[in-house]
């Protein structure tokens, strides 16, 4: 929704990734937010031909030429996409919400991660499997910082962070207990 897109856009504004990889284009709304700044090139993968067609129309209507849509299943397209991307500065994973898929595509992307890379996982509490994958990923030895926003999870690799840290930030609409406070 709007909140997720705002988080993505603000992350791009703050960290200025040159190359972004998105797994799961859907209709292309998040793609437009991820690629809204000059100097950013987005490679986005989508497995569903109908969603890809709608996304292409949205990109054309927005006159955004910084987006490269690659259509096909991730297990087929991800390796080639990784070869085309000069530097994996940011990854947004929003296509396969299974335990196995999340871990598989995370490990594939890890082959090109550098100290300034950021990986964002959407829907980290989507299912038991997705949450299990998120909790395993956070333990990876290269990860220096994880931020749990309930709807999304962010991981950072920056060596300037001397001690591994995990933060859990929950937006107030999700804090159900607040309605019971005086």
Image: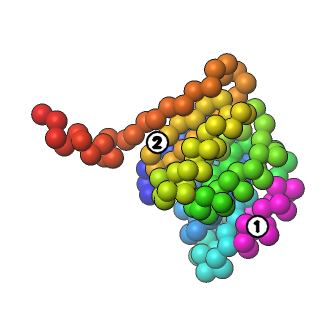
Q: Which quadrant holds the N terminus?
A: bottom left
**Residue 62 image point, x, y percent:** 59, 64
Give the main secondary structure, helix, strand or loop, of the magenta stretch.
helix
**Residue 154 image point, x, y percent:** 58, 41
Label 2 sits on residue: 149
Task: Decide if residue 34 is on the left or right side of residue 77.
Answer: left
Label 1 sits on residue: 75
For residue 94, above or below residue 154: below
- The residue at 70%/28% (across/down) is 158
Whether residue 116 is visible: no
Q: Callout 2: helix, strand or loop?
A: loop
Q: Residues within 10 Å of mark 2 (few under 14, many from 20)?
A: some
For residue 7, above or below residue 103: above
Q: Which quadrant holds the C terminus?
A: top left
Task: Decide if residue 27 is on the left or right side of residue 159.
Answer: left
- The residue at 67%/69% (across/down) is 46
Point out the stretch of residues depicted in magenta. 67-84
């Amino acid at each position: 929704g709007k909140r997720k897109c705002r988080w993505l856009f603000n992350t791009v504004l703050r960290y200025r990734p040159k190359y972004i990889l998105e797994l799961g284009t859907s209709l292309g709304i998040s793609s437009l937010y991820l690629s809204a700044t000059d100097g950013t090139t987005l490679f986005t993968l989508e497995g569903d031909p109908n969603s890809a067609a709608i996304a292409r129309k949205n990109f054309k209507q927005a006159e955004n030429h910084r987006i490269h849509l690659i259509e096909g299943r991730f297990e087929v397209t991800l390796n080639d996409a990784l070869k085309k991307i000069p530097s994996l500065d940011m990854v947004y994973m929003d296509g396969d919400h299974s335990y196995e898929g999340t871990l598989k595509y995370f490990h594939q992307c890890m082959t090109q991660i550098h100290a300034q890379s950021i990986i964002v996982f959407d829907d980290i509490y989507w299912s038991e499997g997705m949450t299990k994958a998120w909790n395993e990923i956070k333990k990876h030895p290269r990860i220096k910082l994880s931020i749990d926003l309930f709807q999304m999870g962010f991981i950072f690799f920056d060596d300037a962070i001397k001690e591994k840290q995990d933060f859990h930030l929950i937006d107030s609409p999700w804090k159900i207990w607040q309605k019971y406070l005086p």
